[in-house]
Image (cartoon, rainbow, N blue to C red):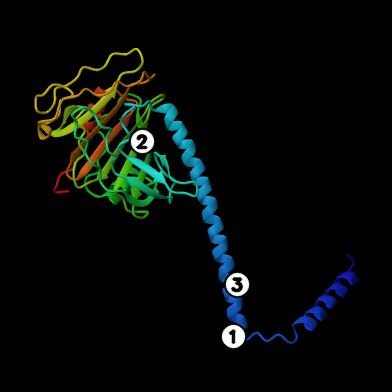
Amino acid sequence: MTRSDRELARRFKEEADEFWFRDVRFDDALKQKVRDRIGKERAAGARSMRVRKTALGALALASAAALLLVIVPQVSPDRQPASTVILSGAGGPGPSPAGGAGDVLVMEGATTPAPFAGGMPSEGPAVREGVSWTPLSAEEAAEAFGPGLAMPGWLPDGFSLRQIGAFGEREGEVFAVTLMYMSEDRTFWLTLRKAGRPEFFPAWQTVDINGAVGYLNAAPPAGGMPAPAEAGTDGAPPGAPPTEAQGTVPASAPEAPAAPWPAAELHWFAGGVQYELQGAITGEEAVKIARSIPLATEEN
């Protein structure tokens, strides 16, 4: 376009603007209409962005869930996970071990254990809604959680802390923290959750965790032998209910399917904190890790 063409275009635009808008008066009513239109466009853009974030978050959660199915063997086919995080989305709720930062989630503090012969399954705490977020460090997680959050003093060879996840009513607040530890070929999770009362698993083996009653369910790797069982805290044989559950019929835990790694799940309660340890570790390792964690106290 030559200079003369650009000049003609400019003059044409000026004359067209004068012709079409010379009678327009930008009064208060028109100003308000413009503001309303801008507000609607911004709201539509924000909704579009939220939908896109939700879709990306759901994809990431699905990938994480698939990875967990490959890495972690199932301890018991009749046992549901003790802690479940559910992402509510357009496609309906779906279980996931963790949500993306800022995702709106629903957490079940504990699901009801599967029934067993003569057992008395315990009821878990009420469902809680909130958001998941990722603390930058263990110190930040401890500060948000408050007194009672403690780290293991002992880990099996090769394990180190790889990721921290937090769950609370809003970002920066915490009522549950999950610490993920990994080695070259194994993974386990430690979850600490504020709770008003302990959870009971009468069909599981009872062990002593620094004076607290622990409930252990462990399976050896394929071709391996189970670790030696410990006596319960009340002197009862392994698998018998603790003193609090007298009158129930002892029942052995269901056999776990063969897996290339050991698998264990251990629960205990102290000082208003419910502890959960699970992953590709032996029962002996689970107990040793648990005993290395300073227990929360009521004074905390």
Q: Residue 96 in the image: x percent, y percent? A: 41, 40
Position of residue 97 relative to residue 16, above or below, is above
The residue sitting at 42% across, 44% down in the picture is: 99
Amino acid tagged 3: Arg
The residue sitting at 16% across, 25% down in the picture is: 250
Nearest to the eye among marks 2 and 1: give it.
1
| Marked residue nearer the N-terminal end (3 or 1) | 1
Position of residue 273 relative to residue 278, above or below, is below
Amino acid tagged 1: Asp
Residue wearing tag 2: 180
How many other residues sit within 10 Å of disc 3, few (<14), some (14-19) or many (≥20)?
few
Residue wearing tag 1: 28
Image quadrant assignment for residue 115 = top left
Residue contact at pointers 3 and 1, CB within 8 angstroms: no
- Cα gap from disc 3 to disc 1, whole angstroms: 14 Å
- Cα gap from disc 2 to disc 1, whole angstroms: 59 Å
Mark 1 lies on a secondary structure that is helix
Nearest to the eye among marks 3 and 2: give it.
3
Q: Residue 133 in the image: x percent, y percent? A: 39, 48
- Cα gap from disc 3 to disc 2, whole angstroms: 48 Å
Mark 2 lies on a secondary structure that is strand
The residue sitting at 39% across, 49% down in the picture is: 105
Residue wearing tag 3: 37
Q: Residue 16 in the image: x percent, y percent? A: 81, 79
| Marked residue nearer the N-terminal end (3 or 2) | 3
How many other residues sit within 10 Å of disc 2, few (<14), some (14-19) or many (≥20)?
some
Q: In the image, which disc is placed on residue 57?
A: none
